[in-house]
Amino acid sequence: MPGAYPTTTTAEAETSSSGTIPAGATSVNGRPIIYIEENDPLGVEELSTLYHMHMGFEEQRWIRMASKFFDQTGKRIEPEWLKVKLGGCRL
């Protein structure tokens, strides 16, 4: 992406095989690479904060689903099991 700057932590970059982010990569070690344009209204730290908020909401999603499933069926399932089974689905 012209004008975009890939952001990742030093630790993440060091753990890739070459120590750099490959062109066109969308993630490193399972964590997304966020490209920041020069005119973006948010900086790296603000985007990092939003990412961590998103991950918290994502974890709560599986807990809510397991709870609602129990309410409807009386059967308990682990949120982690749901995450593994349905993680690729956009529900």
Image (spheres, rainbow, N blue to C red):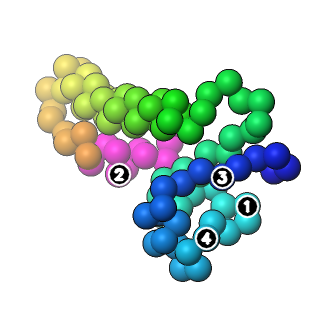
Give the label, 2 or 3, closer to the camera.
3
Q: Nearer the viewer, residue 4 or 23?
A: 4
Sequence-first tag of 4 and 3: 3
Would you say residue 44 sits in the magenta stretch?
no
Q: Mark 2 points at which residue?
A: 84
- Residue 42 appears at what percent x and percent y? 62, 28
- Residue 60 appears at what percent x and percent y? 30, 29
Sequence-first tag of 4 and 2: 4
Residue 62 visible: yes
Q: Mark 4 points at which residue?
A: 20
Is mark 4 in CB contact (under 8 Å) with mark 2?
no
Sequence-first tag of 1 and 2: 1
> Is residue 17 shown above or below 27?
below
* Secondary structure found at label 3: strand
Sequence-first tag of 1 and 3: 3
* Secondary structure found at label 2: helix
Q: How far apart are marks 4 and 2 (CA)?
A: 29 Å
Q: Who's the residue at 58% across and 79% down the image?
A: 18
Q: Distance between the residues labelled 4 and 1?
A: 12 Å
Q: What stretch is highlighted in magenta?
A: 81-91
Q: How far apart are marks 2 and 3 (CA)?
A: 28 Å
Is mark 1 in CB contact (under 8 Å) with mark 3?
no
Residue 6, numbered label? 3
